[in-house]
Image (cartoon, coloured by chain):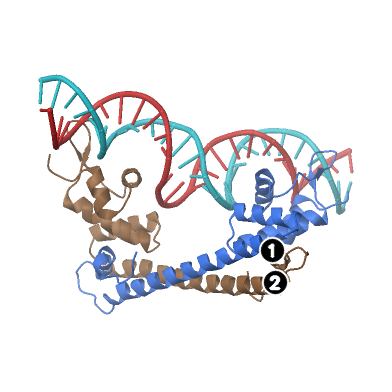
Chain colours: A brown, B blue, C red, D cyan
Amino acid sequence: MQGHSIGALSRRTGVKVTTIRYYEGRGLLPDPGRTGGGQRRYGDAELDRLSFIAHARQLGFDLDAIAELIALQETPHAAHGDAHRIAKDRIIEIRDRIARLRRLEAELVRVVKTCDGQSDGQPCRVLHALADHQACEGEH
Amino acid sequence: MQGHSIGALSRRTGVKVTTIRYYEGRGLLPDPGRTGGGQRRYGDAELDRLSFIAHARQLGFDLDAIAELIALQETPHAAHGDAHRIAKDRIIEIRDRIARLRRLEAELVRVVKTCDGQSDGQPCRVLHALADHQACEGEH
DNA sequence: CTTGAAGCTACAGTGGCTGTAGATCGTATC
DNA sequence: GATACGATCTACAGCCACTGTAGCTTCAAG
């Protein structure tokens, strides 16, 4: 039987079989052809699309954003602005997340330091430091 | 009626009312006292604990880790090592996430750049770039 | 005593899958 | 052909950490 089985697609893209079926249910992949027995068979176009989805997921796009990007691919005219907007939104979001994580890191380091080297019978100050929001300079 | 209502606790900690009840169901907060009519009334100890939970959540601890930290608070002896381990694990995790986000950012910037300034009638290259995993230097 | 905000329980829904059960299919080997 | 066994099928439940809803009761101020 010609075409890729769902397992072959999975091996090639690193996307789990169940996840591929889930994407189909979500409308991100078209209904594929079937064998006489009802098993899915895919062509190279589906392989490409699944690679696209997998890559975009790894870049942190959610499934709705990916659906939007796919729709843009299928209506090529004047899609530049939208695709750029979506990608730039993601960049802004990622920079924001990095900034927040850095603040968290700094605070956790501070929390651990308040206790380091101290080992009497008292409850650990890490726990106090965690409860003590006053000490954070961050805005969270 | 003495004690804080659930709404007062919510206002003081920034944790939503429904979330407070959810924490109670998860065992992170004890069953509070109730008024004759069945409404929850909290003391300062519960307020402190909820602040602790809220702060730890903001630092990215999951509820299981927080439950562990609370358990450590209640059995003070020899808790240092464990509390430090949990906090240090989080620091490592956060650094890892920062590193991965930076790679994503770099790639997205690259993706957007492949197209910038180009505005013919062709499908946007952002979409190609997203599908083209070959071009990533990262390990994802 | 009335009113309206706040609280109550119980349950369904979110996103993005993952795991399970129990059946069927496809293909390599004998 | 028959058989064996892995791959695939559908349908549904479960995960995390909430969030939202419906329909009711309670509290506290005026």
Q: Check residue B80 in the rendering and tell me which mark sits there, or answer none.
A: 1
Labelled pair 1, 2 in contact (Cβ < 8 Å): yes
**Residue lying at 22% horizontally and 66% vertically, measured from the top left:** B123
Q: Residues within 10 Å of mark 2 (few under 14, many from 20)?
A: some
Q: Residues within 10 Å of mark 1 (few under 14, many from 20)?
A: many
Residue A89 in view in this figure:
no
The quarter holding residue A71 reads: bottom left
Q: Amino acid at mark 2?
A: Cys
Give the alpha-carbon distance from disc 1 to disc 2, as whole Å: 8 Å
Q: Percent from the top left, x then y, of residue A110?
A: 64, 74
Q: Check residue A115 in the rendering and tell me which mark sits there, or answer none.
A: 2
Task: Determine whether, in the image, residue B71 is placed left or right of residue D7.
Answer: right
**Image quarter (top left, top right, bottom left or bottom right) of the C terminus of chain B:** bottom left
The quarter holding residue B133 reads: bottom left
Q: Amino acid at mark 1?
A: His
Residue A102 in view in this figure:
yes
Q: Secondary structure at mark 2?
A: loop
**Residue lying at 24% horizontally and 75% vertically, measured from the top left:** B119
Q: Secondary structure at mark 1?
A: helix
